[in-house]
Image (cartoon, helix red, strand yellow):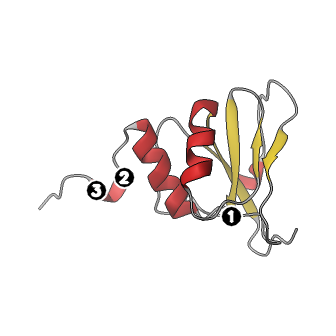
Amino acid sequence: MRQPLGCDAVAMPAEFGPRLLERLPRVGCVYEDGPRWWWIVPADSDVALQWPPSAFYSPGAVVPDATREPVLVHRPEGSVPYTPPIPLYLGLCRLSGAVPGWAGAVRA
C-alpha cells in the first residue's frame, strides 16, 4: 500500500472497534492487539484535534506495550491505508461520550 502522507495510529478500546467499523463511510487499515483496535490515519492527524481520553494517539504508528502482535482486522479496498481522521474522531467521541474539542462552551 502507498503511504503518501506518512502514518500515525489511533488506538481505542476493542469494544468500540466493530461499532465504528460498520458506521464509518471509509475505513483504512485497522489492527487489533487484544484490548485495543489501532486505526491507521495520516501523519499529524492530532494537529488541532484533542482525541478523547479513551484514545491513544501514536505518532509513527508505534504500538507500545502490546499484549500480542497486532493482527489486521480490516484492509481497505483501495491502495491507501488511511481512515479519514475527522469521521473517526467524531465517531469515537460519540461512542465514548466525549465532547469534540470545538463543541465546548464559547468564552468571550
Q: Position of residue 68 (x, y in %)?
A: 85, 27
Q: Which residue is mark 3?
A: 103
Q: Quadrant of residue 76?
A: bottom right
| For residue 98, above or below residue 22 | above
Residue lying at the far bottom in this picture: please name it.
Answer: 4
Q: Position of residue 30 (x, y in %)?
A: 74, 49
What element does badge 2 sit on? loop
Frontmost of labels 1 and 2 is 2
Q: Position of residue 11 (x, y in %)?
A: 64, 41
Circle 2 Cα neighbour tier, 10 Å, few/some/many (<14 / 14–19 / ≥20):
some
Q: Residue at x 78, y 70 (%)?
A: 80
Spatial CA distance of label 2 from label 3 is: 5 Å
Instruction: Name the residue type under label 3.
Output: Ala
Q: Position of residue 40 (x, y in %)?
A: 71, 55
Circle 3 Cα neighbour tier, 10 Å, few/some/many (<14 / 14–19 / ≥20):
few
Residue lying at the far left in this picture: please name it.
Answer: 108
Q: Which residue is mark 2?
A: 100
Q: Is 53 or 30 nearer to us in this picture?
A: 30
Q: Relative to 39, is 75 on the left or the right? A: right
Asked if the residue at tag 1 contacts the one at tag 3, i.e. Cβ–Cβ closer than 8 Å, the answer is no
- Looking at the rendered image, the quarter that the N terminus falls into is bottom right
Q: Is 104 or 37 nearer to us in this picture?
A: 37
Residue 51 visible in the current orientation: no
Instruction: Name the residue type under label 2.
Output: Pro
Q: Which residue is mark 1?
A: 43
| Mark toward the start of the polypeptide (1 vs 2) | 1
Instruction: Name the residue type under label 1.
Output: Ala
